[in-house]
Image (cartoon, rainbow, N blue to C red):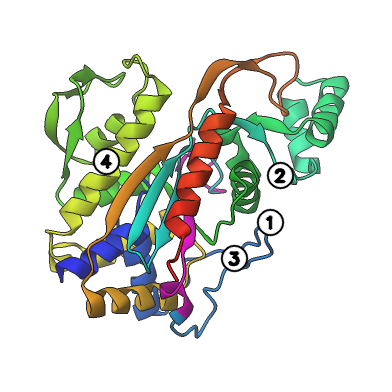
Amino acid sequence: MRKEKIILAILSLAMIAGSMLGLSVLIEHIQGQEVVEKIETAGGKTGKAAEGETEQAGITEKPFQVLVSGLDLTSSMKKKRVGRSDLNLLLTVNPVSKKILITNISRDTYLEVVDPPEMTEEEEKNLKANGLTKDQIKGIKEARKNNPKTKLSHVSLYGTSTLVKTVEGFLDTKIDYYVQTTMAGFQTLIDAIGGVDVEAVESFQTDWGTLFKKGSNHVDGKKAATFIRERHHFNEGELRRGKNGIEMMRAIIDKLCHVSLLEMDADKLYQLWKDNVKTDMGAGEVLSLLRMQVEDRAEWEFTSAQIKGEMGFEELMDYQQDKFYVQVPDPASIEKVQKKIADVCQIDS
């Protein structure tokens, strides 16, 4: 069963967090309940988790990409399940060559929003309630049309479809699937599998008072959340935060390779993922990948990448007069990541 858990963890990946995708979709398939949302990306692709879906053999025969994002929901956002994406990882999977590339894109990355939605009456009403003048609201509407730029974490506020299209446009690549989770879902997953052992490259303290020593640290859900959210106590800042997110994902995969599914509370986790996870990957596709892994028992090669850039102050399309702290991406860094994606997607003839 160890290899089967590896592929489960690979698929569910980060959400920050290992097997959320794999397990939630499998439980959905078994129990016949829907926990997905269909969206259409810039490439016209629509989610395939339809009722009565069968296995999709094609997913084992060619590379695919999954965008995983972790949402930070405020109390006012929880009911609508709309929040800022604090963690954004692009998973590039080549099931033929058995290669996985995990690319971290900083929440502060300054980019152009693809197809930003027009302002709704409800949104305009909320802006007025928050004290914005008619001229300021007019300016926001014009900015969405003429200069639709903001930081990546804000793009998720416009919906999953806009987030996926924007990342596709930013990296000039096609995203086949998405997975989103909340911070509460991430913490509960960590606790449900008995915590994880994560590697810290240096000793540090977080804004929440938790301490990490250089080397291996055993963490529960609450402490794990501080590990991936901390950025103020590092010279590298957001760059180190992104690397810590990747390290946490590795720790979760390792734990899932050694913990039995029977040791988990499946009913509790299912309800958790139903409330905290969205994905458009179908159960049949996950089962096809699992069957492939059972048959070939292959080892997977993991690599990682990070979009880099200079920190500065720029205007965001939905805010007037003020400038915000953002990361302006380095074009050379983008090209380097694009090359890594292309290399992983290469299939030898």
Magenta residue span = 58-80
Label 4: state its secondary structure.
Answer: helix
Whichever of callouts 3 and 2 sits on the residue coming sooner in the sequence is 3
Mark 3 packing: few (<14 Cα in 10 Å), some, or many (20+)? Answer: some
State the CA–CA distance, disc 1 to disc 2. Answer: 9 Å
State the CA–CA distance, disc 3 to disc 1. Answer: 14 Å
Residue 132 visible in the snapshot: yes
The residue to which callout 1 is attached is 42
Residue 142: name its quadrant: top right
State the CA–CA distance, disc 3 to disc 2. Answer: 18 Å
Label 3: state its secondary structure.
Answer: loop
Tell me the amino acid under the disc marked 4. Answer: Met
Task: Name the residue located 37 percent from the left edge and 16 percent from the top edge.
Answer: 232
Q: Are marks 1 and 2 in contact (CB under 8 Å)?
A: yes
Mark 2 packing: few (<14 Cα in 10 Å), some, or many (20+)? Answer: many
Residue depth check, mark 3 versus mark 1: number of the one nearer the observer:
1
State the CA–CA distance, disc 4 to disc 3. Answer: 28 Å
Whichever of callouts 1 and 4 sits on the residue coming sooner in the sequence is 1
Say which mark, if any, is on residue 114. Answer: 2
Q: How many marks?
A: 4
Whichever of callouts 4 and 2 sits on the residue coming sooner in the sequence is 2
Task: Name the residue located 55 percent from the left edge and 30 percent from the top edge.
Answer: 332
Task: Name the residue located 48 percent from the left edge and 37 percent from the top edge.
Answer: 105
Q: Are marks 4 and 2 in contact (CB under 8 Å)?
A: no
The residue to which callout 3 is attached is 38
The reply to whether the magenta stretch includes residue 74 is: yes
